[in-house]
Image (cartoon, helix red, strand yellow):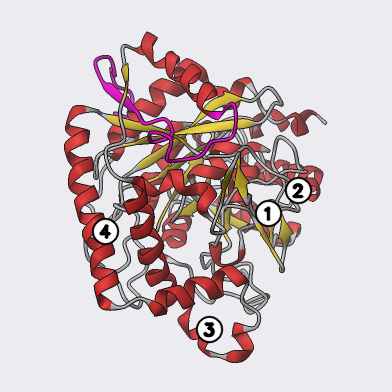
Amino acid sequence: MDDVLSLDALEQAALLQKRDISAFDLMQAALAQIARLNGRVNAIVSLRDDEALLAQARAADDAERMGWMHGLPIAVKDLANAAGFPTSMGSPLFAGQVAAHDDLMVARMRAAGAIVIGKTNTPEFGLGSHTFNPVHGATGNAYDPALSAGGSSGGAAVALACHMLPVADGSDMMGSLRNPAGWNNVYGFRPSWGRVPDDAEGETFLHPLSTAGPMARSPRDLAALLEVQSGPEPRRPFGLPLETFLNRIDADVAGRRIGWLADWGGAYAMEPGILALCEEALEDFAPLGIAVEAVPPPFAAGDLWRAWLDLRAFANADRLGALYDDPASRAQLKPAARWEVERGRALDLDAVRAASLIRSRWYACAADLLTQFDALVLPSAQVWPFPLAQDHPTVIGDTPMDTYHRWMEVVVPASLIGLPAMSVPAGFSTAGLPMGMQLIGRHGDDLGLLQLAEAWHRATNWPGRRPPPILGA
């Protein structure tokens, strides 16, 4: 059964549908893999008791199929609610708090037949692109557990890379699907904002920065999971209509054009080797008939960063404000959370308006640029995976990082305006560490990015060519 775990999720699902394997046997194999590897990487947390999960799998074998995910084990990112499981959000304030209901995305995955087995680890409140917290500890990289897995969907990426899960959910405000995917040699897709809605709770108009989305070892699995996760929630504004992706993912991509933004004209400090690796990887588009063209910086990076700092703090002040207002809970918030709230509350109306005006101008500029190109490309991170004990990089080369997240500035152009962004594996450093590239597309053109990623996967298949050494250890 170990070989089954190396198959893509759709391949596992096909075997289950044909009854060539049982959900019980697949669950047994997955739990054995978790028992073998999770202690070394700490990707999956709050794992349910084996006997309870095996009983669920046995019941799935006897039940009518609910959808393509029927009988597949999944673990939900520990920022989302899955009924019956703790939702710690990596914070001691919520450690052990058991969810009474599923969030919308989780409910949709269960309705497609998935069996929730536990949660995947995340930074406290998802803040920062390094997965560590005081509740569950740190998640190690699949290719070197002594290094960071990225974040905030770090547990999901590592569990995928280590074949503990066939497919995974994640969320992305500031690269949280893209950075860990790139650092663990899997695919992470931040869909167009509005494609995968949250529940209709609280304020639903003002903060279009974060979205949930899929992670997988292949674009076909991404497409299939995105179909499950997506579709409008009528009580939320700006939802995109339901689309099918899997049946249209195979396409002739010859003639498409890609714009290479590199380091944004030097605005984004990069550790040595990252740009060279991505430029070498871009050469693999030529045999596909895809032209790659260098593009000068289309917008002032400093303006994007200022708008991002203000609008992100504005959103986080709303999200975490109640915890900050209680002195007891404020004392337990990590410094980055307190800084976000304080910065957000210090903004006046003119500052928020000015930030949103920059965002509006950048959206129009990007829309014009994406009439010339089918996708824009940037590295998925500015640094290689760093030591697990390090909170975050404080310098890149000679450039100091003046915030806890400045080292991930490269993900801001897509996040600020809700564009779809696909992290595809780009290869490995001389030290054997993975890196990814972001493919950024027009808002609503999630299919176009999936088609590019599928063509890329067929040409390169980095997850199949270079699985983590830990799998054979």
Q: Which residues are magenta?
A: 248-274
Dot 4, how many residues are within 10 Å of its Cα: few (below 14), some (14-19), or many (20+)? some
Instruction: Please give the name of the residue rendered at 49% of the width and 71% of the height, measured from the top-left corner.
Output: 340
**Distance from label 1 to label 2 (Cα)?**
7 Å
Q: Circle 3 sits on which residue?
A: 324
Q: Earlier in the sequence, mark 1 or mark 2?
A: 2
113 lies above or below 85: above
Residue in front for this viewpoint, 375 or 195: 375
Element carrying mark 2: helix
Residue in front for this viewpoint, 354 or 130: 354
Quadrant for residue 181, please give it.
Answer: top right
**Distance from label 3 to label 4 (Cα)?**
32 Å
173 lies above or below 265: below
145 lies above or below 114: above
Give how far across and how far down residue 68 sits, in percent: 44, 42
**Distance from label 2 to label 4 (Cα)?**
35 Å
Which disc is residue 44 wearing?
1
What's the residue type where badge 1 is placed? Ile
Is-magenta flag for residue 267? yes
What's the residue type where badge 3 is placed? Tyr
Element carrying mark 4: loop
Report the quarter where the N terminus lies. Answer: top right
Which disc is residue 232 wearing?
4
Give how far across and how far down residue 200 sits, in percent: 32, 72
Instruction: Please give the name of the residue rendered at 30% of the width and 78% of the height, measured from the top-left corner.
Output: 348
**Distance from label 1 to label 3 (Cα)?**
29 Å
